[in-house]
C-alpha cells in the first residue's frame, strides 16, 4: 500500500495505491461514524469512480448528494496498471488546525458491481487510522511517517502505524489501537458479568439449599453475586460499547441483543426482589368433606383438621363418660384420661381432609426460566461480538487478533463446562 497526502495551495491532495484493488477510501476524521469519506475504484472500461459518502455508524456509507467539500479526481496523478493501481484526488483544506489532521482509511480487494457512485460496497478487508502534520518540515520526521517541504506534507510507506497492510486470514497479529483496546475491555467485562458471575449466582440458588450450613444463607449469596458483583461490571461494559457506537445505536444483531440483555437483566433483578420480599398471602383451601369418608385416602397427601362439629361432639362424649361407666367398670377411652386427651388431640377419620400445599409458586419458575434465557442470549451475543462484529467494524479476522482467539477458545470450553455443571 502507498498512501500520499500533501497540501498544495488551498487543496489537500491524497493518493492511495495498491497492488490488488477493489475499492479504497479515505475519511477525514478519527472514526467512521459521521466522517466524510471519499471512496474510489477503477472500472473495467478504464474509468475511475469517485464517490463521496458518509455513514451514521459502522455500516456501509451512502452517497452524500451535496457534500460540504467536493473532491476532484486527479487523472494526471492516477495510475491504472495490471499489478499496481494508484488513484489521486484533491479536496479543499480543512478549516481546523493543520498540525494534527486525523484520517481514516479502508480498502477491499473486491470491486463494486458497477461504476455508479451509489454502487454497493463489499465490506473492507482492512482499515485503520492515522494522524498527519501538514505544517512540519520534511526533515523533522523519518521517512514513512510524515514529511514536508514548505507547504507540502507527505506520508509515504506501508500501512499507518499499528495496523498491518496485508489482508485475509494470514499474517502476524495486529497491534490493537486505542478504540480496539476499549472494545476488548467491553468484551471482557460483558463476558465476565453475563457468562461467569450470573451463572455462578444460578448455581448458588440451585445447589446451596442442599448444603446444611448454606441453606439459610443462599439468598444473601445469590443476591450479592447477581447484583453487587455482576451489576457494576455489566453496566461498565455496556457503557463502553454504547460510547463506541457513536451517535447512532442498535443497527445490527449484536448491539440490539446487547440492549435486550440489559433490559432483561434489570427486569430479572426487579422480579427476584418482588418474589423474595413481597410474597402474596396464600388463600385457604376449601374443605374436601368427601375425602374424609374415602377409606383409601392417602394420609401423606392430606392434613387432617378437626371441624367445629367434631370438637363439640368430642367434648359432649367426654362429659358423659365422667358420669357413667361401662359394664366392665372402666372409663370410656373418650373420657378425660390421658388416653382420652390423646384421642382428643388426634382428629378422627371422619374429620375434614384438606390438601397439603406443596411445590413453588409459578412466579418462581418464571424467574428461573428468565435467568437461563438471559445466560443463553449472552452466550450468543459474545459469539456474535468476536466472530461477526469485530471483523465487520475493524476489518481484521479472529485469526489475527490474539485476544479474539483466546476468547473463542474460552467460549467453546465454557459452553461445555457450564452445560455439564448445571445438568449434573
Image (cartoon, rainbow, N blue to C red):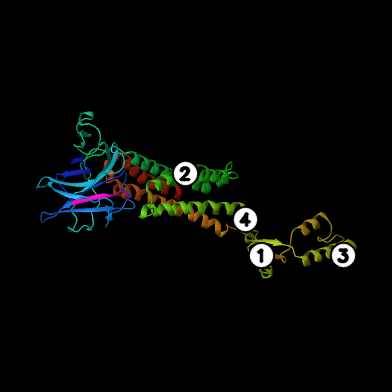
Q: Say which of 203 and 246 sits in front.
A: 246
Magenta stretch: includes residue 39: yes
Q: Say which of 297 and 18 sits in front.
A: 18
Q: Residue furthest right?
A: 323
Q: Quadrant of the N terminus?
A: top left
Alpha carbon distance from label 2 to label 1: 41 Å
Identify the residue position indicated by label 3 in the image: 320
Alpha carbon distance from label 4 to label 1: 18 Å
Identify the residue position indicated by label 1 in the image: 285
Alpha carbon distance from label 2 to label 3: 69 Å
Alpha carbon distance from label 1 to label 3: 35 Å
Range of the magenta residues? 34-40
**Residue 376 seen:** no
Identify the residue position indicated by label 4 in the image: 279
Please tell me how many numbered marks the rendered image carries.
Answer: 4
| Classed neighbour count for the residue bearing mark 4: other residues with Cα under 10 Å, few (<14), some (14–19), many (≥20) | few
Q: Secondary structure at mark 3?
A: helix
Q: Residue furthest left?
A: 82
Q: Which mark is residue 28?
A: none
Task: Give the mark, 2 or 1, whose residue is nearer the N terminus.
Answer: 2
Horizontally, is 132 left or right of 287 in the view? left
**Residue 361 seen:** yes
Q: Residue furthest top?
A: 139
| Classed neighbour count for the residue bearing mark 1: other residues with Cα under 10 Å, few (<14), some (14–19), many (≥20) | few
Residue lying at 20% horizontally and 34% vertically, measured from the top left: 150
| Classed neighbour count for the residue bearing mark 2: other residues with Cα under 10 Å, few (<14), some (14–19), many (≥20) | many
Identify the residue position indicated by label 2 in the image: 197
Residue 17: horizontal and vertical position, in percent?
16, 44
Amino acid at each position: 500500500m502507498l498512501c500520499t497526502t500533501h497540501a498544495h495551495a488551498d487543496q489537500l491532495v491524497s493518493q492511495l495505491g495498491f497492488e490488488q484493488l477493489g475499492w479504497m477510501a479515505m475519511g477525514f476524521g478519527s472514526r467512521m461514524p459521521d466522517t466524510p469519506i471519499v471512496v474510489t475504484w477503477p472500472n473495467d472500461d478504464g474509468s475511475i469512480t469517485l464517490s463521496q459518502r458518509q455513514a451514521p455508524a459502522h455500516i456501509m456509507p451512502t452517497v452524500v448528494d451535496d457534500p460540504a467539500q467536493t473532491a476532484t479526481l486527479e487523472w494526471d496523478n492516477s495510475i491504472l496498471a495490471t499489478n499496481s493501481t494508484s488513484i489521486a484526488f484533491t479536496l479543499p483544506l480543512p478549516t481546523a488546525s493543520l498540525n494534527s489532521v486525523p484520517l481514516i482509511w479502508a480498502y477491499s480487494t473486491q470491486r463494486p458491481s458497477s461504476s455508479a457512485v451509489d454502487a454497493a460496497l463489499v465490506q473492507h478487508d482492512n482499515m485503520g487510522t492515522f494522524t498527519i502534520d501538514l505544517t512540519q518540515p520534511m526533515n523533522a520526521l523519518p521517512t514513512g511517517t510524515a514529511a514536508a517541504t514548505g507547504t507540502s506534507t507527505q506520508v509515504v510507506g506501508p500501512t499507518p502505524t499499528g495496523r498491518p497492510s496485508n489482508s485475509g486470514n494470514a499474517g502476524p497479529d495486529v497491534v490493537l489501537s486505542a478504540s480496539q483496546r476499549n472494545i476488548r475491555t467491553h468484551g471482557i467485562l460483558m463476558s465476565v458479568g453475563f457468562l461467569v458471575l450470573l451463572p455462578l449466582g444460578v448455581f448458588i440458588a440451585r445447589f446451596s439449599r442442599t448444603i446444611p450450613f448454606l441453606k439459610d444463607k443462599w439468598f444473601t449469596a445469590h443476591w450479592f453475586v447477581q447484583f453487587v458483583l455482576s451489576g457494576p461490571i455489566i453496566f461498565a461494559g455496556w457503557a463502553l460499547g454504547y460510547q463506541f457506537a457513536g451517535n447512532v445505536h442498535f443497527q445490527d444483531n449484536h448491539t440490539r441483543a446487547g440492549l435486550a440483555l440489559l433490559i432483561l437483566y434489570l427486569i430479572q433483578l426487579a422480579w427476584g426482589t418482588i418474589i423474595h420480599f413481597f410474597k402474596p398471602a396464600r388463600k385457604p383451601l376449601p374443605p374436601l368433606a368427601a375425602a374424609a369418608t374415602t377409606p383409601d385416602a392417602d394420609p401423606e397427601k392430606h392434613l387432617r383438621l378437626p371441624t367445629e362439629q367434631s370438637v363439640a361432639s368430642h367434648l359432649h362424649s367426654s362429659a358423659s363418660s365422667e358420669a357413667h361407666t361401662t359394664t366392665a367398670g372402666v372409663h370410656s377411652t373418650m373420657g378425660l384420661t390421658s388416653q382420652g386427651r390423646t384421642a382428643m388431640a388426634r382428629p378422627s377419620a371422619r374429620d375434614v381432609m384438606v390438601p397439603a400445599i406443596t411445590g413453588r409458586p409459578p412466579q418462581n419458575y418464571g424467574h428461573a426460566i428468565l435467568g437461563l434465557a438471559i445466560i443463553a442470549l449472552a452466550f450468543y451475543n459474545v459469539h456474535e461480538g468476536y466472530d461477526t462484529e469485530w471483523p465487520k467494524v475493524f476489518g481484521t479476522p479472529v485469526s489475527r487478533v490474539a485476544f479474539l482467539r483466546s476468547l473463542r477458545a474460552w467460549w467453546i470450553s465454557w459452553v461445555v463446562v457450564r452445560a455439564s455443571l448445571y445438568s449434573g
